[in-house]
Amino acid sequence: MNTRIRAAVMLAAIVSSPFFGLEERTSAQSTDDCMKVKGRLMQDSSSGRNLGTITNGGILNGRTEIVFATAAFPTPDPTTVSFIGDLTLATHRGVLKTHDVYLFDFFSGVGTGIHRVDSNASTGVFSGARGVLYDNSKSTSPSTVHGNVTGELCFADK
């Protein structure tokens, strides 16, 4: 990685570090109803779209679509890239929208994502909700990814 990219990554880490954990502190001070969530994720891109499902996830059970916003960015590891996108999860209780940051290692086929809930764009029981979901996944074919989703959702007082 060249010096300019390394400097930009370090600057971004330094500038954003005061904000790490901010949502957790805000949630702890709130009287919102929070719950831990987890489920199984399967994504398939063979159709040209990144469609999938979350199962065994209770309130998260539903159909997913991920729209990637940019091309991949290099990381200090030559086989690993980062990229961003937006997840839409349609359930029978509403639509959960998130803004995501991903890391993917081409060598091992392993990836991870951080999904920050967009409380304004989500609907149904997810309207006004806050929280973060995390996924850990593995590519099982050139177009299929399987993994686990965990996190916490805090629902707005109605």
Image (spheres, rainbow, N blue to C red):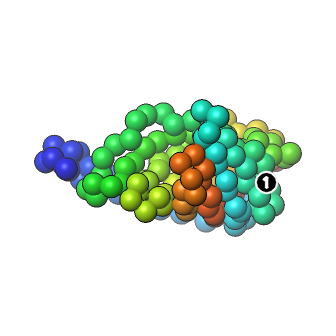
Q: Nearer the viewer, residue 47 or 16?
A: 47
Query: Is 113 positioned to the left or the right of 153 in the image?
Result: left
Q: Nearer the viewer, residue 31 or 108?
A: 108
Q: Residue furthest left?
A: 3
Q: Is residue 17 above or below residue 119?
A: below
Q: Residue 121, how many percent across, how many down? A: 67, 35
Q: Residue at x 43, y 44 (%)?
A: 83
Q: Residues within 10 Å of mark 1 (few under 14, many from 20)?
A: many
Q: Residue 108, how many percent across, how many down? A: 43, 62
Q: How many marks?
A: 1
Residue 27 visible from this viewpoint: no
Query: Is 77 positioned to the left or the right of 128 in the image?
Result: left
Query: Is 37 positioned to the left or the right of 49 in the image?
Result: right
Q: Residue at x 86, y 45 (%)?
A: 92
Which residue type carries mark 1?
Answer: Asn
Q: Which quadrant would residue 60 be assigned to in this image?
A: bottom right
Q: Residue 145, how many percent across, how many down? A: 59, 54
Residue 83 visible from this viewpoint: yes
| Label 1 element class | loop
Q: Residue 72, how many percent across, how many down? A: 38, 41
Q: Residue at x 38, y 59 (%)?
A: 107
Which residue is labeled 1 in the image?
61
Q: Nearer the viewer, residue 88 or 125?
A: 88
Q: Residue furthest front?
A: 141
Q: Is residue 66 above or below residue 53?
A: above
Q: Residue at x 67, y 53 (%)?
A: 42
